[in-house]
Image (spheres, rainbow, N blue to C red):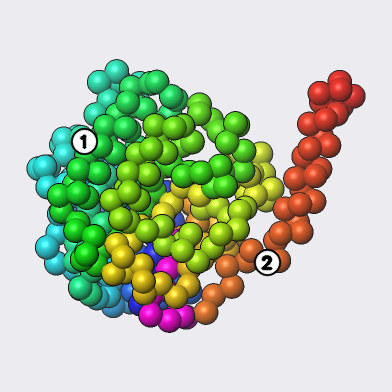
Amino acid sequence: MRIATWNVNSLKARLEKVEWWLDRAQPDVLLMQETKLTDQEVPLMPFTARGYELVHHGDGRWNGVAIVSRLGASDVITNFGDGPVRDSGAGAAVSLDEEDFNPFDEARMVSAVCGGIRFTSIYAPNGRVVGSPFYVGKLAWFERLARWVAECLPVAEPAVIGGDFNVAPTDADVWAAARAHGGTHVSPPERDAFGRLLAHGLVDGYRRVHAETGRYTWWDYRAGMFHKNYGMRIDHLLLTPPVAERVAWAEIDREARKGVPIPSDHAPLLVDLDGRDVPIDAGWEGAESRFRARQAADRRAEARRSDGTS
Protein backbone atom coordinates (compact mmCIF):
# COMPACT_ATOMS: atom_id res chain seq x y z
CA MET A 1 0.00 0.00 0.00
CA ARG A 2 1.32 3.43 -0.94
CA ILE A 3 0.18 6.44 1.10
CA ALA A 4 1.12 10.04 0.40
CA THR A 5 0.51 13.63 1.40
CA TRP A 6 0.81 16.75 -0.73
CA ASN A 7 0.00 20.42 -0.25
CA VAL A 8 -1.06 21.14 -3.83
CA ASN A 9 -1.37 24.93 -3.40
CA SER A 10 -4.69 25.17 -5.30
CA LEU A 11 -6.21 22.05 -6.79
CA LYS A 12 -7.78 24.10 -9.58
CA ALA A 13 -4.44 25.61 -10.60
CA ARG A 14 -2.45 22.35 -10.18
CA LEU A 15 -5.02 19.81 -11.40
CA GLU A 16 -2.95 18.84 -14.43
CA LYS A 17 0.08 18.31 -12.17
CA VAL A 18 -1.96 16.25 -9.70
CA GLU A 19 -3.26 14.04 -12.52
CA TRP A 20 0.30 13.57 -13.78
CA TRP A 21 1.47 12.61 -10.31
CA LEU A 22 -1.36 10.15 -9.66
CA ASP A 23 -0.37 8.35 -12.87
CA ARG A 24 3.31 8.57 -11.95
CA ALA A 25 3.20 7.44 -8.31
CA GLN A 26 -0.11 5.52 -8.16
CA PRO A 27 -0.79 6.08 -4.46
CA ASP A 28 -3.58 4.10 -2.82
CA VAL A 29 -4.37 7.03 -0.52
CA LEU A 30 -3.34 10.64 -1.11
CA LEU A 31 -3.95 13.34 1.49
CA MET A 32 -4.17 16.82 -0.05
CA GLN A 33 -4.04 20.26 1.52
CA GLU A 34 -4.63 23.84 0.42
CA THR A 35 -7.12 22.84 -2.27
CA LYS A 36 -8.64 26.35 -2.13
CA LEU A 37 -12.03 25.06 -3.31
CA THR A 38 -15.52 24.64 -1.93
CA ASP A 39 -16.88 21.11 -1.79
CA GLN A 40 -19.10 21.91 -4.77
CA GLU A 41 -16.17 23.10 -6.90
CA VAL A 42 -14.02 19.96 -6.60
CA PRO A 43 -13.38 18.35 -10.04
CA LEU A 44 -14.36 14.73 -9.36
CA MET A 45 -14.02 13.25 -12.85
CA PRO A 46 -10.19 13.14 -13.02
CA PHE A 47 -10.18 11.14 -9.79
CA THR A 48 -13.12 8.80 -10.42
CA ALA A 49 -11.75 8.01 -13.89
CA ARG A 50 -8.64 6.68 -12.15
CA GLY A 51 -10.61 4.62 -9.65
CA TYR A 52 -10.38 7.05 -6.73
CA GLU A 53 -13.01 8.25 -4.30
CA LEU A 54 -12.53 11.82 -3.07
CA VAL A 55 -13.56 13.20 0.31
CA HIS A 56 -13.20 16.97 0.48
CA HIS A 57 -13.63 19.64 3.16
CA GLY A 58 -13.26 23.19 1.92
CA ASP A 59 -14.86 26.60 1.99
CA GLY A 60 -13.26 28.21 -1.05
CA ARG A 61 -10.69 30.26 0.80
CA TRP A 62 -6.95 29.62 1.09
CA ASN A 63 -7.30 26.32 2.96
CA GLY A 64 -9.20 23.12 2.12
CA VAL A 65 -8.24 19.48 2.75
CA ALA A 66 -9.03 16.21 1.00
CA ILE A 67 -8.55 12.45 1.03
CA VAL A 68 -8.20 10.66 -2.29
CA SER A 69 -8.61 6.90 -1.92
CA ARG A 70 -8.98 3.82 -4.06
CA LEU A 71 -9.58 1.77 -0.90
CA GLY A 72 -12.96 3.32 -0.14
CA ALA A 73 -13.69 6.04 2.41
CA SER A 74 -16.15 5.87 5.29
CA ASP A 75 -16.90 7.40 8.70
CA VAL A 76 -15.93 10.92 7.62
CA ILE A 77 -15.06 13.51 10.28
CA THR A 78 -14.42 17.19 9.60
CA ASN A 79 -13.21 19.99 11.86
CA PHE A 80 -12.46 17.55 14.71
CA GLY A 81 -16.18 16.78 14.84
CA ASP A 82 -16.87 20.24 16.27
CA GLY A 83 -19.45 21.21 13.67
CA PRO A 84 -19.19 23.23 10.46
CA VAL A 85 -16.66 25.97 9.90
CA ARG A 86 -17.90 29.52 9.46
CA ASP A 87 -19.82 29.98 6.22
CA SER A 88 -17.83 32.57 4.33
CA GLY A 89 -19.85 32.31 1.13
CA ALA A 90 -18.52 30.86 -2.09
CA GLY A 91 -15.01 32.12 -2.62
CA ALA A 92 -15.30 34.87 -0.02
CA ALA A 93 -12.09 36.07 1.55
CA VAL A 94 -11.40 37.10 5.11
CA SER A 95 -8.81 39.75 5.77
CA LEU A 96 -5.48 38.23 6.67
CA ASP A 97 -4.96 41.18 9.03
CA GLU A 98 -7.92 40.45 11.27
CA GLU A 99 -7.07 40.63 14.94
CA ASP A 100 -9.78 38.07 15.66
CA PHE A 101 -8.20 35.37 13.49
CA ASN A 102 -9.76 32.01 14.36
CA PRO A 103 -8.30 28.90 12.67
CA PHE A 104 -11.33 26.88 13.76
CA ASP A 105 -13.40 28.89 11.28
CA GLU A 106 -11.35 27.35 8.46
CA ALA A 107 -11.41 23.98 6.68
CA ARG A 108 -8.20 22.42 7.99
CA MET A 109 -9.05 18.83 8.96
CA VAL A 110 -10.81 15.88 7.36
CA SER A 111 -10.64 12.23 8.40
CA ALA A 112 -11.97 8.95 6.99
CA VAL A 113 -11.39 5.21 7.23
CA CYS A 114 -9.73 3.79 4.09
CA GLY A 115 -8.68 0.16 3.81
CA GLY A 116 -9.01 -0.41 7.54
CA ILE A 117 -6.83 2.59 8.48
CA ARG A 118 -8.12 5.94 9.72
CA PHE A 119 -6.50 8.63 7.60
CA THR A 120 -6.56 12.27 8.63
CA SER A 121 -5.51 15.10 6.33
CA ILE A 122 -4.54 18.32 8.09
CA TYR A 123 -3.43 21.79 7.07
CA ALA A 124 -2.02 23.53 10.14
CA PRO A 125 -2.07 27.33 10.29
CA ASN A 126 1.11 29.04 9.11
CA GLY A 127 1.60 31.26 12.15
CA ARG A 128 3.15 34.08 10.12
CA VAL A 129 5.21 35.82 12.84
CA VAL A 130 5.97 34.65 16.38
CA GLY A 131 3.69 36.40 18.86
CA SER A 132 1.12 37.49 16.26
CA PRO A 133 -2.58 36.53 16.50
CA PHE A 134 -1.90 34.03 13.73
CA TYR A 135 0.84 32.39 15.80
CA VAL A 136 -1.37 32.23 18.89
CA GLY A 137 -4.13 30.72 16.77
CA LYS A 138 -1.71 28.15 15.37
CA LEU A 139 -0.74 26.95 18.84
CA ALA A 140 -4.41 26.78 19.85
CA TRP A 141 -5.15 24.72 16.75
CA PHE A 142 -2.35 22.28 17.63
CA GLU A 143 -3.78 21.97 21.14
CA ARG A 144 -7.11 20.95 19.61
CA LEU A 145 -5.37 18.48 17.31
CA ALA A 146 -3.50 16.90 20.23
CA ARG A 147 -6.71 16.59 22.23
CA TRP A 148 -8.51 14.95 19.31
CA VAL A 149 -5.62 12.53 18.78
CA ALA A 150 -5.61 11.58 22.47
CA GLU A 151 -9.37 11.09 22.53
CA CYS A 152 -10.00 9.50 19.15
CA LEU A 153 -6.83 7.78 17.89
CA PRO A 154 -5.74 4.96 20.21
CA VAL A 155 -2.13 4.13 19.37
CA ALA A 156 -2.97 0.43 19.29
CA GLU A 157 -5.22 0.98 16.26
CA PRO A 158 -4.07 1.70 12.68
CA ALA A 159 -4.13 5.41 11.88
CA VAL A 160 -2.27 7.99 9.81
CA ILE A 161 -2.20 11.76 10.28
CA GLY A 162 -0.65 13.47 7.31
CA GLY A 163 -0.40 16.89 5.82
CA ASP A 164 1.22 20.27 6.01
CA PHE A 165 2.03 20.71 9.70
CA ASN A 166 3.93 23.97 9.06
CA VAL A 167 6.52 22.78 11.60
CA ALA A 168 10.12 21.70 10.97
CA PRO A 169 10.56 19.39 13.98
CA THR A 170 14.34 19.82 14.39
CA ASP A 171 17.15 21.92 12.95
CA ALA A 172 17.93 18.95 10.69
CA ASP A 173 14.60 19.64 8.98
CA VAL A 174 15.38 23.20 7.84
CA TRP A 175 18.20 24.59 5.76
CA ALA A 176 18.88 27.42 8.25
CA ALA A 177 16.70 27.66 11.34
CA ALA A 178 18.05 31.11 12.24
CA ARG A 179 16.84 32.48 8.92
CA ALA A 180 13.28 31.11 8.98
CA HIS A 181 10.86 33.95 8.25
CA GLY A 182 9.45 35.44 11.44
CA GLY A 183 10.88 32.57 13.46
CA THR A 184 7.78 30.50 12.77
CA HIS A 185 7.93 26.79 11.89
CA VAL A 186 11.02 26.39 14.09
CA SER A 187 10.07 28.08 17.37
CA PRO A 188 10.18 25.99 20.57
CA PRO A 189 6.39 26.16 21.23
CA GLU A 190 5.64 24.91 17.71
CA ARG A 191 8.19 22.13 18.00
CA ASP A 192 6.80 21.23 21.41
CA ALA A 193 3.32 20.98 19.88
CA PHE A 194 4.63 18.61 17.23
CA GLY A 195 6.56 16.69 19.89
CA ARG A 196 3.38 16.09 21.88
CA LEU A 197 2.00 14.13 18.93
CA LEU A 198 5.11 11.95 18.91
CA ALA A 199 4.87 11.56 22.69
CA HIS A 200 1.37 10.19 22.21
CA GLY A 201 2.98 7.34 20.28
CA LEU A 202 2.82 8.56 16.68
CA VAL A 203 5.84 7.75 14.51
CA ASP A 204 7.39 10.02 11.86
CA GLY A 205 7.09 7.76 8.81
CA TYR A 206 9.81 9.48 6.81
CA ARG A 207 12.33 9.50 9.64
CA ARG A 208 11.70 5.81 10.23
CA VAL A 209 13.56 5.23 6.96
CA HIS A 210 15.66 8.37 6.41
CA ALA A 211 18.11 9.89 8.87
CA GLU A 212 20.01 12.11 6.44
CA THR A 213 19.70 15.89 6.41
CA GLY A 214 19.04 18.10 3.40
CA ARG A 215 15.73 16.50 2.44
CA TYR A 216 12.83 18.95 2.43
CA THR A 217 9.19 19.11 1.33
CA TRP A 218 8.82 22.89 0.86
CA TRP A 219 10.86 25.59 -0.84
CA ASP A 220 9.99 29.26 -1.30
CA TYR A 221 9.31 30.22 -4.92
CA ARG A 222 11.66 33.20 -4.58
CA ALA A 223 15.42 33.63 -5.00
CA GLY A 224 16.11 30.22 -6.48
CA MET A 225 15.48 28.54 -3.11
CA PHE A 226 14.47 25.26 -4.71
CA HIS A 227 17.53 25.02 -6.92
CA LYS A 228 19.81 25.81 -3.96
CA ASN A 229 17.85 23.36 -1.77
CA TYR A 230 17.07 26.00 0.84
CA GLY A 231 13.91 24.42 2.17
CA MET A 232 12.08 22.93 5.14
CA ARG A 233 10.58 19.53 5.93
CA ILE A 234 7.18 20.66 7.14
CA ASP A 235 4.94 18.01 5.54
CA HIS A 236 4.70 14.78 7.51
CA LEU A 237 3.05 11.39 7.71
CA LEU A 238 2.63 10.40 11.37
CA LEU A 239 1.70 6.77 11.93
CA THR A 240 0.44 4.77 14.88
CA PRO A 241 2.70 1.79 15.70
CA PRO A 242 0.55 -0.82 13.89
CA VAL A 243 1.10 1.16 10.68
CA ALA A 244 4.67 2.25 11.41
CA GLU A 245 5.87 -1.33 11.75
CA ARG A 246 4.70 -1.96 8.19
CA VAL A 247 6.82 0.83 6.64
CA ALA A 248 9.06 -0.50 3.88
CA TRP A 249 10.08 2.67 2.03
CA ALA A 250 9.64 6.42 2.17
CA GLU A 251 10.56 9.29 -0.13
CA ILE A 252 9.97 12.94 -0.96
CA ASP A 253 9.27 13.28 -4.66
CA ARG A 254 11.42 16.25 -5.59
CA GLU A 255 10.60 15.78 -9.28
CA ALA A 256 7.01 16.86 -8.64
CA ARG A 257 8.30 20.28 -7.54
CA LYS A 258 9.68 20.88 -11.05
CA GLY A 259 8.39 21.55 -14.53
CA VAL A 260 5.24 23.02 -16.00
CA PRO A 261 2.60 24.03 -15.32
CA ILE A 262 3.99 25.94 -12.35
CA PRO A 263 4.15 23.36 -9.56
CA SER A 264 3.16 23.67 -5.94
CA ASP A 265 5.85 24.99 -3.61
CA HIS A 266 5.52 21.66 -1.76
CA ALA A 267 6.63 18.20 -2.90
CA PRO A 268 4.66 15.01 -2.23
CA LEU A 269 5.79 12.77 0.62
CA LEU A 270 5.28 9.02 0.11
CA VAL A 271 5.41 5.99 2.40
CA ASP A 272 5.04 2.39 1.22
CA LEU A 273 3.64 -0.25 3.56
CA ASP A 274 4.34 -4.00 3.32
CA GLY A 275 6.92 -3.70 0.54
CA ARG A 276 7.98 -1.38 -2.29
CA ASP A 277 5.28 -0.16 -4.63
CA VAL A 278 5.65 1.39 -8.12
CA PRO A 279 9.29 2.53 -8.47
CA ILE A 280 9.88 6.27 -8.95
CA ASP A 281 13.05 8.32 -9.24
CA ALA A 282 12.55 11.20 -6.83
CA GLY A 283 15.52 13.10 -8.30
CA TRP A 284 17.62 13.64 -5.17
CA GLU A 285 20.80 11.81 -6.08
CA GLY A 286 21.46 13.63 -9.31
CA ALA A 287 20.76 17.03 -7.77
CA GLU A 288 23.12 16.97 -4.79
CA SER A 289 26.23 18.17 -6.64
CA ARG A 290 24.23 21.03 -8.15
CA PHE A 291 22.95 21.99 -4.68
CA ARG A 292 26.49 22.25 -3.36
CA ALA A 293 27.67 24.34 -6.30
CA ARG A 294 24.77 26.78 -6.04
CA GLN A 295 25.06 27.05 -2.27
CA ALA A 296 28.77 27.77 -2.57
CA ALA A 297 28.08 30.48 -5.16
CA ASP A 298 25.44 31.94 -2.88
CA ARG A 299 27.89 32.07 0.05
CA ARG A 300 30.49 33.81 -2.13
CA ALA A 301 27.94 36.38 -3.23
CA GLU A 302 26.91 37.03 0.37
CA ALA A 303 30.55 37.44 1.37
CA ARG A 304 31.08 39.99 -1.41
CA ARG A 305 28.03 41.94 -0.30
CA SER A 306 29.26 41.90 3.30
CA ASP A 307 32.66 43.18 2.17
CA GLY A 308 31.08 45.86 0.01
CA THR A 309 32.80 44.51 -3.09
CA SER A 310 29.77 43.53 -5.12
Q: Residue at x 24, y 29 (%)?
A: 102
Expressed as whole percent of the image width and height from the top left, the position of residue 257 reads: 55, 57
Provide the residue designation for mark 2: 285
Q: Callout 2 environment at 10 Å: few (<14), some (14 to 19), or many (20+)?
A: few
**Which residue appears farthest toward the right when viewing the image?**
309
Residue 81 showing in the rendered view: yes
Provide the residue designation for mark 1: 104
Q: Which quadrant of the rendered structure holds the N terminus?
A: bottom left
Expressed as whole percent of the image width and height from the top left, the position of residue 210 reads: 54, 63
Expressed as whole percent of the image width and height from the top left, the position of residue 259 reads: 59, 60
In the shown orientation, is residue 132 left or right of residue 45? Answer: right
Q: Is residue 234 magenta?
A: no
Q: Residue at x 57, y 47 (%)?
A: 172
Q: Callout 1 environment at 10 Å: few (<14), some (14 to 19), or many (20+)?
A: many
Label 2: which secondary element: helix
Vertical comparison of 65 with 129: above or below: below
Label 1: which secondary element: helix
Magenta extent: 269-278
Earlier-in-chain disc, 1 versus 2: 1
Q: Residue at x 42, y 42 (%)?
A: 166
Q: Looking at the image, how many numbered discs can be counted on the residues?
A: 2
Vertical comparison of 264 with 131: above or below: below
Q: Which mark is residue 153?
A: none
Q: Which quadrant of the rendered structure holds the C terminus?
A: top right
Give amino acid for label 1.
Phe
- Quadrant for residue 45, please give it: bottom left
Expressed as whole percent of the image width and height from the top left, the position of residue 21 reads: 46, 68
Give amino acid for label 2.
Glu
